[in-house]
Amino acid sequence: MTQVLQTPSFKKTAKKLHANQKQDLDDAIRVLLDEPTIGEQKKKQSFVPARL
């Protein structure tokens, strides 16, 4: 079984959603759990240190 972890900020935001929005979120998470390869992978951003 796959576990889904929530960040505290995500949990706080999800808690404030209306019931219909929460249901849409839950449906989207279930789709991702069923098919984790859908969508595009987030591009890794390279770190550029600031010069002082």
Image: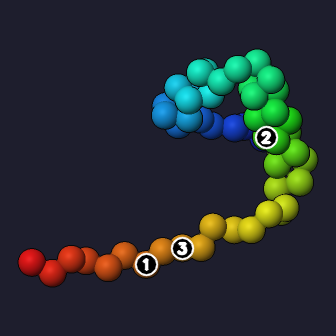
Q: CA distance from mark 3 to mark 2?
A: 22 Å
How many numbered badges does the structure rendering display?
3
Q: Is residue 24 visible?
A: yes
Which residue is outermost to the left?
A: 52
Please state which amino acid type lies under the numbered disc 3: Lys
List x then y, in percent, for residue 6. 59, 35
Residue ID at (15%, 81%): 51
Residue ID at (84%, 61%): 38
Residue ID at (56%, 29%): 13
List x then y, in percent, for residue 28. 82, 41
Tag shown at residue 44:
3
Display coloring: rainbow
Please state which amino acid type lies under the numbered disc 2: Ile
The mark nearer the N terminus, 1 or 2, is 2
Residue ID at (9%, 78%): 52
Element at label 1: loop
In the image, residue 46 sits, relative to residue 31, either above or below, namely below
Judge left or right: residue 44 versus residue 31.
left
Please state which amino acid type lies under the numbered disc 1: Ser
Density class for disc 2 (Cα within 10 Å; few <14, some 14-19, many ≥20) is some
Element at label 3: loop
Q: Is residue 1 visible?
A: no
Task: Determine whether label 1 and label 3 are within 8 Å by CB.
Answer: yes
Tag shown at residue 29:
2
Query: Residue 40 sits in which quadrant?
Result: bottom right
Q: Which residue is mark 1?
A: 46
In the image, residue 19 sits, relative to residue 47, either above or below, namely above
